[in-house]
Image (cartoon, grey):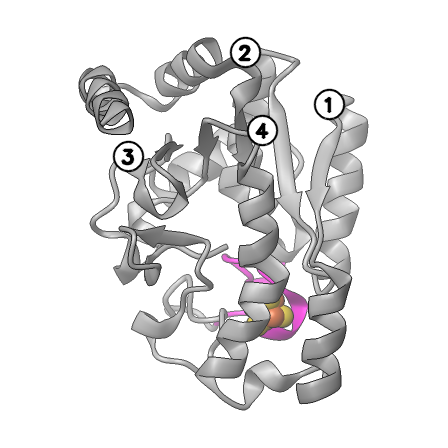
Amino acid sequence: MAQEQNTQKLEREIQPLQDSDAEQVVRWALERFDDQVALASSFGVEDMVLTDMMLRISPRARIFTLDTGRLPKETYDLMERVRERYGVRIEVFAPQSSQLEKMISESGPNAFYRSIELRRLCCNVRKVEPLGRALQSLSAWICGLRRAQAVTRQELKKLEIDEAHGGMLKINPLLEWSDKEAWNYVMERDVPYNVLHDRSYPSIGCAPCTRAVQPGEDIRAGRWWWETPEQKECGLHRTGSSKTDTTGGQ
Ligand code: SF4
């Protein structure tokens, strides 16, 4: 009952913010939740916009990342550049070694190419379980999801109750931003970005599951390219309590 009342109170609080711009939303989140809110960064261009925006508003802003162990070298290089440029401590959550050892021993290191089930198992071990631990200490999380990124992201809201993660608040400040707006921000402020973006990688995840796209291809075409668009989710951004993949993906 108390939980339900808190959720209703939060829903009333966030309603007027749905039409606010990205910076207003980020500022509100940092003031409202202080160290109980953090950015979930995979170091894509949207995450770099939010990193810069958050740290300009508050140098104490928290950033965490999921180190799957299979990220491209270029992403680790960017992590180093972000640490140097902003002097920020990036909180890292890695897969549990026992789960990783079991999965690789039983199915091999590249099992994700063989079936959707094995791909989802890998994403669960390397991303979803660590995300659950990362969110445990938070009341709200900030993500770089944009509606234009994927067919699976059409129903998102800028601020929403995240039922899949215990009713905490999930904030997508850049939801209505275009690709061009994100890049304009990065270029105007000389924000560091992943050099893979310059090599036709608009969306970057783990190295074995990401490839460059061809001119005219969808921006998510290089992610899990052997699967159909509606299957291309890793479970990080679920909606509802059913734990069904319906939105998002790192
Ligand atoms: S994106 Fe690929 S390598 Fe990374 S966790 Fe998912 S299946 Fe595993």
Q: Nearer the viewer, mark 4 or mark 3?
A: 3
Residue identifier under label 2: 57
Numbered disc 3: secondary structure:
strand
Q: Which mark is residue 160?
A: 3
The mark nearer the N terminus, 3 or 2, is 2
| Picture residue at 46% right of the left edge, 9% below the top | 31
**Residue 232 vertical position relative to residue 134 in the rendered view, above or below:** below
Q: Is residue 233 left or right of residue 59?
A: left
| Picture residue at 55% right of the left edge, 37% below the top | 136
| Picture residue at 56% right of the left edge, 86% below the top | 113
Q: Is 202 a magenta residue?
A: yes
Question: Magenta segment, which residues?
Answer: 199-213
The mark nearer the N terminus, 1 or 4, is 4
Residue 102, by quadrant, is bottom right
Numbered disc 1: secondary structure:
helix
Name which residue type carries label 3. Glu
Name which residue type carries label 2. Ile
* Spatial separation of the CA atoms under disc 2 and disc 1: 13 Å
The mark nearer the N terminus, 4 or 3, is 4
Residue identifier under label 1: 86
Residue identifier under label 4: 51
The mark nearer the N terminus, 2 or 1, is 2
Neighbours of disc 4 within 10 Å: few (<14), some (14-19), many (20+): many
The foreground one among 112 and 10 is: 10
Q: Is residue 174 left or right of residue 242?
A: right
Instruction: Find out whether the residues at labels 1 and 4 contact each other: C-beta distance under 8 Å.
Output: yes
x, y percent for residue 200: 55, 63
Numbered disc 2: secondary structure:
helix
**Residue 223 vertical position relative to residue 54 in the rendered view, above or below:** below
Name which residue type carries label 1. Tyr
| Picture residue at 29% right of the left edge, 47% below the top | 147
